[in-house]
Image (cartoon, coloured by chain):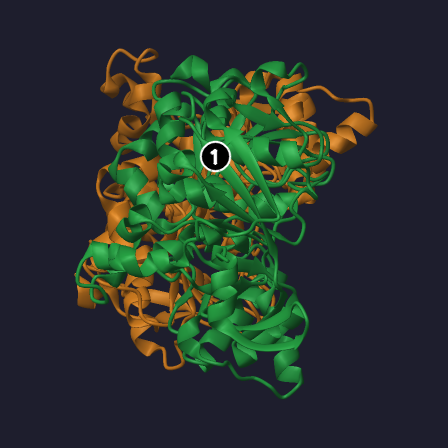
Chain colours: A green, B orange
Amino acid sequence: MGMTTAEKIFAAHLVDEPFSGTKVLRLDVVLCHEITTPIAIDDLVARGKDRVFNPENIKAVIDHVTPAKDTKTATQGKILRDWARRHQIKDFFDIGANGVCHALFPEKGFIRPGYTVIMGDSHTCTHGAFGAFAAGVGTTDLEVGILKGVCAFREPKTIRFNINGELPKGVYAKDLILTLIGKIGVNGATDRVMEFGGSTVDTMSMESRMTLCNMAIEAGGTSGICMPDMTTVEYLWSFIHDQFATKEAALASYQQWCSDADAVYEQVIEIDASVLVPVATFNYKPDQVRPVTEFSESRVDQVYLGSCTNGRIEDLRIAAQILKGKRLAENVRGILSPATPKVYREAMKEGLIDIFLDAGFCVTNSTCGACLGMSNGVLADGEVCASTTNRNFNGRMGKGGMVHLMSPATAAATAIEGRIADPRNYL
Amino acid sequence: MGMTTAEKIFAAHLVDEPFSGTKVLRLDVVLCHEITTPIAIDDLVARGKDRVFNPENIKAVIDHVTPAKDTKTATQGKILRDWARRHQIKDFFDIGANGVCHALFPEKGFIRPGYTVIMGDSHTCTHGAFGAFAAGVGTTDLEVGILKGVCAFREPKTIRFNINGELPKGVYAKDLILTLIGKIGVNGATDRVMEFGGSTVDTMSMESRMTLCNMAIEAGGTSGICMPDMTTVEYLWSFIHDQFATKEAALASYQQWCSDADAVYEQVIEIDASVLVPVATFNYKPDQVRPVTEFSESRVDQVYLGSCTNGRIEDLRIAAQILKGKRLAENVRGILSPATPKVYREAMKEGLIDIFLDAGFCVTNSTCGACLGMSNGVLADGEVCASTTNRNFNGRMGKGGMVHLMSPATAAATAIEGRIADPRNYL
């Protein structure tokens, strides 16, 4: 009987099975940021266990509130920084080198097909875009991961999404995943792996695959997973060319992690991508999704472009294409946070930053605090934000604020019109 | 008997003299930002006095914490924004258009020779660089200013600083003002106007004059003042060319505000600029100043380039000149906050942003919250920051943190060496 990607990764990393269905896996990478890891560090120190299983397998970044906004966040950064120095964690990204974790770590080549990845962050599922099993965990699991390099998981069942057809003009990975979540609901994939395949995914960039996998958790999914292919190899090539003689050799190696043709899924869902339309969320759950053409009350005060969902270079490119030569609507303020310094520099080189500035956007350093109302664009009571982020919970970007999730293209069109707008009118 | 600039401005704006020595002046400009003005707005509203004397004479900006870091600061911004809309205050600068108030307002041409200027901000004295009388005020004065366009002042006596000679290589306006404050002390000019003249000031850019006047308050001064001259006219020309037939005509008009040759000063202090050296502050008062060559314990964790004191284009140019092709020291994090969007874009066009990024700096949007520990680079307990800002009070940039004030050149050299360094070694 064939196996899914997740099953293959579980089998290859199995260390122990303390009881049926719960498997302890060896971890390839433990990712850390300054909001959740300092709690684990403090606890490990208090327990006299201030050690790390292997500094080379730990990657850390300050990304949520950076530069620090107050003593608390300065202290969180300092705890992480001191810990990284103390344990010779070389891959620590501080102010100046830091960016949004789920964009930065892939960009650095840290995520590979077949890897097991944990982080104390719910959007860790993003990294499944590389054919990895990547899951957000709580403090206890994070501590064990840091100390022992292992983590216990219930072996998740997999829901396969067969997504075929060409995405229409103005429709992107963000519209696809929002539509999927709208279809299956916020609990539709709880404790499941969401495996994305089919011609639509096969032709997607790694950036778009990351957008797709990023929001698996919004349907309850443990990890999103895409099949590694030549797109994956191309993305990683600068990091792996010493390891493989040719790209084809890398591909052959990575494809061992692809789900077998006869793999058994809990459920298979077929999606025709060619009929999708640009969508946005309404109300306060990520599965409350409707076409952008069906919004009546749709005034926005702020447009936010950025985050681990949609702050990458292809996101900035499409938004800039729409914004070029245009201005923000009178009562809209625009914030662009390129996800990483590399994205920022690339955008500067391509003239995108100029376009955003000409349009009236504020361009901030790379950080993701706005998404969860922690910094860099918190809403006041009663304000509405059109946002390329991943969560529209009540008050998520600020108490009393409302968030409409959407693609960068829709956010750009919305910025121009001051109300939720259809990007197809600008393409 | 001749008059000083301050006396001339007082005479020309006199509305009332309720008792001897206290003069009520007509205000040309009331400046506002989102930290102090919302308190005044809320009080005016509560008193049923939600009016402004003239929306054209009021200028407002969100600059201290922008984009908002939390509900409190989002609300402060919203109060200011709603008020500006309600009263048709056209010169309101929101996210995307906003920058550090004392850099932005001059850049917009709002400050002219002979003006009276108030703001609920201690560094309002900056604007005296244009030959204006500009003073920071408390909430009550700000409310009266907003409502009636007047403010009561004790007529300040003037201390004249005759500063002559060429500043040596590596020595800048910041070194000059720090040296002056070191000389006269933090109370050396309390309730006095600090009038800066002499060949050194005459040959200074407007940017450097703003740096000089900006720190008048650190010696207790009510306002700094420089004499308007052709440099002033050139800076303002794009805003005043409709008003004057020629630059010479503008100069002739503006020079009415210059202190007379036979003006009477309370004190005249002579400074030989040619013997000055690069300095930095030690300890927690701005008059605790010593040459950069005399620091022993001088490790720094963070270097901050920005603020109303030194975040202007000439500041970025000199820092970039030193940093070009170099990297931050291992344990130093660097933050650059260009003071305004215009400064940021100019720096981008000149390739300075690339230099800072290559050196390892984080480039933030324009904001000044780091200076007072409000956002954008707050220190943790025990951390040390080399900073181009204006105050080194205990905990100013974060509780338990230490700040060394210095010029942008010295900050750049310090960033490279990781300890307080001499910029002359890099020029």
Q: Is residue B103 shown left or right of residue A189? A: left
- The answer to whether residue B97 is visible is no
* Location of residue B332 in the rendering, given as x and y in whole percent from the top left corner: 38, 68
Q: In this view, does B173 lie above or below A350?
A: below
- Within 10 Å of disc 1 (Cα), the crowding (few <14, some 14-19, many 20+) is many
Q: Which of B421 and B327 is in front in this view?
A: B327
* Location of residue A154 in the rendering, given as x and y in whole percent from the top left corner: 65, 64
* Subunit of label 1: A
Q: Is residue B296 shown left or right of residue A87? A: left
Query: Which residue in the structure is indicated by mark 1?
Result: A163
Q: In which quarter of the image is residue A279?
A: top right
Q: Which of A80 and B423 is in front in this view?
A: A80
Q: Please tell me whether mark 1 sits on a helix, a strand or a loop.
A: strand
Q: Residue at x 57, y 49 (%)?
A: A265
Quarter of the image with the C terminus of chain A is top left
Q: Is residue A264 above or below residue B205?
A: below
Q: Residue at x 63, y 15 (%)?
A: A294
Q: Quadrant of residue A15?
A: bottom right
Q: Which residue is drawn at 34% across and 66% down?
A: B279
Tell me the amino acid under the disc marked 1. Answer: Ile
* Location of residue A141 in the rendering, given as x and y in whole percent from the top left corner: 63, 70
The residue lying furthest to the front in this view is A1
- The answer to whether residue B59 is visible is yes
